[in-house]
Image (cartoon, helix red, strand yellow):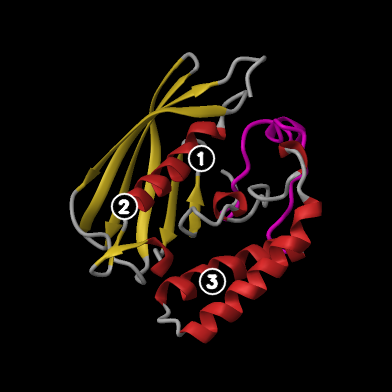
């Protein structure tokens, strides 16, 4: 059984880090910054900005862009997406989820879609739901893989409105393994209401692939 909250992949730390970059835990300054950035994006999406505030924010963002420009690194040395204990490994476009139980071939978690993922009428954007499934289904697909498995196919059925700002339940489980192929299913629920379900195919990479 994998510890709840961990999104560790196959093999050792070195094998999980296929591109050779560094992995971080969620309690580092970078991990805390990613949490703050996620919260910031929700507030920007939810706010009605006056011109003065928008101009001030634009100036601040321009200053930070200038400060970050000399720090741009090649993919193997970037930190974005390499926070081991954070949802999506710290990629802020993935809806935040909290794993409650992770087995050898299954995952049960809680997720809340914020204003950043709003489609309209307090419903989460369909693309955000699909992105969540790609992330969630990919975890059990990679749990026992010798090498990383990438998404080859993802089909999502939208059954009901997925609300924002409400804690939902999401689960995923491996249904079949055929050689390098891993077939996975998932569900997103609001209590007893099925909001969406998905099926995906993940294929384990060959030694020369990344």
Q: Residue tagged by mark 1?
A: 139
SS type, badge 1: helix
The Cα atoms of the two marked residues, 2 and 1, are separated by 15 Å
In the rendered image, the vertical position of residue 173 relative to residue 97, given as above or below: above
Foreground mark, 1 or 3?
3
Q: Residue tagged by mark 2?
A: 188
The Cα atoms of the two marked residues, 1 and 3, are separated by 24 Å
Labels 2 and 3: the sequence-earlier one? 3
Callout 3 crowding tier (Cα within 10 Å): few <14, some 14–19, many ≥20? some
Labels 1 and 3: the sequence-earlier one? 3
SS type, badge 2: strand
Q: Nearer the viewer, residue 94 or 12?
A: 94
The picture places residue 188, in percent across and down from the top left corner, at 31, 52
Q: Residue tagged by mark 3?
A: 39
Q: Nearer the viewer, residue 98 or 83?
A: 83
Callout 1 crowding tier (Cα within 10 Å): few <14, some 14–19, many ≥20? many
- Quarter of the image that includes the N terminus: top right
Instruction: Give the number of the disc on residue 117.
Output: none
Magenta segment boundaries in residue numbering = 4-27
Majority secondary structure of magenta residues:
loop
């Amino acid at each position: 059984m994998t510890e709840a909250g961990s999104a560790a992949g196959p093999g050792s730390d070195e094998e999980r880090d296929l591109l050779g970059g560094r992995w971080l835990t969620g309690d580092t300054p970078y991990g805390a910054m990613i949490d703050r950035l996620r919260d910031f994006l929700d507030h920007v999406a939810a706010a009605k900005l006056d011109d003065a505030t928008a101009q001030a924010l634009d100036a601040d963002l321009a200053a930070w862009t200038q400060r970050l420009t000399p720090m741009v690194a090649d993919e193997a040395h970037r930190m974005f997406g390499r926070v081991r204990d954070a949802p999506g490994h710290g990629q802020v476009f993935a809806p935040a989820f909290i794993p409650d139980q992770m087995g050898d071939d299954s995952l049960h978690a809680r997720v809340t879609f914020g204003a950043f993922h709003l489609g309209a009428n307090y419903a989460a954007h369909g693309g955000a739901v699909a992105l969540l499934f790609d992330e969630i289904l990919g975890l059990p697909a990679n749990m026992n893989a010798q090498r990383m498995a990438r998404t080859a196919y993802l089909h999502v059925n939208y059954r009901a409105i997925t609300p924002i700002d409400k804690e939902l339940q999401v689960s995923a489980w491996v249904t079949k393994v055929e050689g390098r192929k891993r077939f996975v299913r998932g569900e997103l629920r609001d209590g007893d209401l099925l909001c969406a379900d998905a099926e995906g195919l993940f294929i384990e990479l060959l030694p020369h692939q990344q």
